[in-house]
Image (spheres, rainbow, N blue to C red):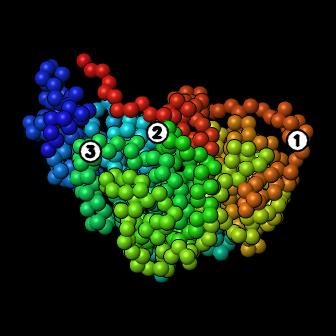
Amino acid sequence: MADDKDKKGLRSRQWFGRQDSYGFIYRSWLRNQGHTAEMFDGRPVIGICNSWSDLNPCNGHLRELAEHVKRGVYAAGGFPLEFPVTSLGEALMRPTAMLFRNLASMDVEASIRANPIDGVVLLVGCDKTTPAALMGAASVDVPTIVVSGGPMLSGSWEGRRIGSGTDVIRFKEAVRAGTMSLQDFMAAETAMSPSTGSCMTMGTASTMASLCEGLGVALPGNGAIPAVDARRHAISFEAGKRIVAMTHEGLRLSKVLTREAFENAVVLNAALGGSTNAVVHLLAIAGRLGVPFTLEDWDRLGSEVPCLLNLMPSGEYLMEDFFRAGGVPAVLNEIASLLNGDALTVTGRTQSENNAGAVRFDERVIRPLDQPFRPKAGIAVLRGNLAPSGAVIKPSAATPELLVHRGRAVVFTSADDLKARIDDPDLPVDKDSMLVLQNCGPRGYPGMAEIGNMPIPAKLLRQGITDMVRISDARMSGTAFGTVVLHVAPEAAAGGPLALVRDGDMIALDVPGRSIHLEVDDAELERRRAELKPFVSPYGRGYERLYVDHVMQADSGVDFDFLVGGSGDYVPRESH
């Protein structure tokens, strides 16, 4: 139980500690849920921020986890109060869940600040819910722990293991190439998702859940425990206990999410072969806290780090295998020499203390640092006249022979144009061409959809071509693979040079040299720019209008310009 000094420092005391009509109102209405007087005696009030939704299959089991968090909070002497927030399901939301990441973050921020909450447990799963919740919590800066929903069990079809997202892409291309029947494709659908939870590949959901350990905002083991494993319930219970202690200790999120923590996350992302989406998410989270962290840090800190994890989409195994092989703690222990080991975590211990002695149980899944699965696997940041503010590529998911390549552009001006023409037998494309997709960035789509891994033209698939260089201002799913240049900034819709590319232009890609160059002289580019029509968004009202008017570019994390820097945990004025 907190002493008097602790009680005075709790935000909730400004609601429940009052002996006036306001206190009467705040306590009395909550009593209609059966809460007893001792819940208002000065104990910490813990918000359980739940992104559960039937419309978000990855998060469909989070109500069950919330009950285990509550048990932990009660056991530690806290008062748990669960509240809902916007749930972002990548599987169903159109035009893209990323369009609503900033909206969900505003929901989380407002819900925490407006209510009597001293500390918060973020229940998250599908990939955008994790960064959205962390962005919102960071803007308030109360004690915070992340509890992820965990990955699904491994898929299995016709005697082979299949992974969500990754094998969907493979199967789709096989159907287009004529090597897989539509009947088989539809049959595989029933085997892809055998349990509750998020993608069981190292997609963005598993990446962000794992990086929460690297950032220090989740308990050790959070990243890989399967959704249906009883140990997922146990870690939820422990998180509930721990958040109560954190409120007494004053262990705010800003004390954990330091520059050193973000550096650790970059290194861990490389070691995991993690998603390129982590780039924009971590930039946005850091921006909410005012932590100096840039796109260049991704390349400088992580590009030389080897990938230790043999996991789809870069490898062959799945998250269930990763968990049994030792999970994120084993990887963090293996790369301890590359980390800021003294970075503080939500456990109250340092990163190195959390993971010291963690064991790799299966070297087929988690390779040793001196015998990695892939060398130099981190995110590479490219610059040049085609991407003056930067672009990214994931070398571990690319074809090595294409990392240095020169080819003619085949340009698609929009996602609709791509869909209409990609399988046209008269499309002027060959295996050395570079597919270029415009107007699919933050403003252009809007929301920067996961369509950067453009499909290989059908006529090339039938020739046995399975990869080619693709360039866009869009993102791609963390479950995807290929030689794909993403997040080109500024985007085409913002007048970036990507908008000036025309069919037949030569483009030179040099990933080792970190360059991407459009081989068109400056005079011609200026002539094209003069003819360029300004982007006009089809959205004239509502949240979408707000998004297009205020979203920043990929190199700044795709957050809203007015949300950079938090507002703190101030208590708003009374409501009556």
In the rendered image, the vertical position of residue 33 relative to residue 229, given as above or below: above
> Looking at the rendered structure, which numbered label has been put on residue 249?
3
* Residue at numbered disc 1: 522
Residue at screen point 55% across, 76% down: 370
Answer few, some or many: residues within 10 Å of disc 1's Cα (few below 14, many 20 plus, some between 14 and 19): few
* Residue at numbered disc 2: 289
Quadrant of the image containing the N terminus: top left
Residue 69 seen anywhere in this rendered image of the structure: no
Q: Quadrant of residue 322?
A: bottom left
As drawn, is 75 to the left or to the right of 11?
Answer: left
In the image, residue 252 lies at what x, y percent?
Answer: 34, 42
In the rendered image, the vertical position of residue 348 relative to residue 15, given as above or below: below
As drawn, is 525 to the left or to the right of 319?
Answer: right
Q: Amino acid at mark 3?
A: Glu
If you read the primary sequence from the N terminus, does the residue marked by circle 3 or circle 2 appear first? 3
User: Which element is circle 3 on?
Assistant: helix
Q: Amino acid at mark 2?
A: Leu
As drawn, is 282 to the left or to the right of 408?
Answer: left
Relative depth, front residue between 143 and 404: 143
If you read the primary sequence from the N terminus, does the residue marked by circle 3 or circle 1 appear first? 3
If you read the primary sequence from the N terminus, does the residue marked by circle 1 or circle 2 appear first? 2
In the image, residue 22 lies at what x, y percent?
Answer: 18, 22
Q: Amino acid at mark 1?
A: Asp
- In space, the residues marked 1 and 2 are separated at their CA atoms by 39 Å
Residue furthest left in the image: 37
Residue at screen point 55% across, 45% down: 293
Residue at screen point 44% across, 79% down: 362
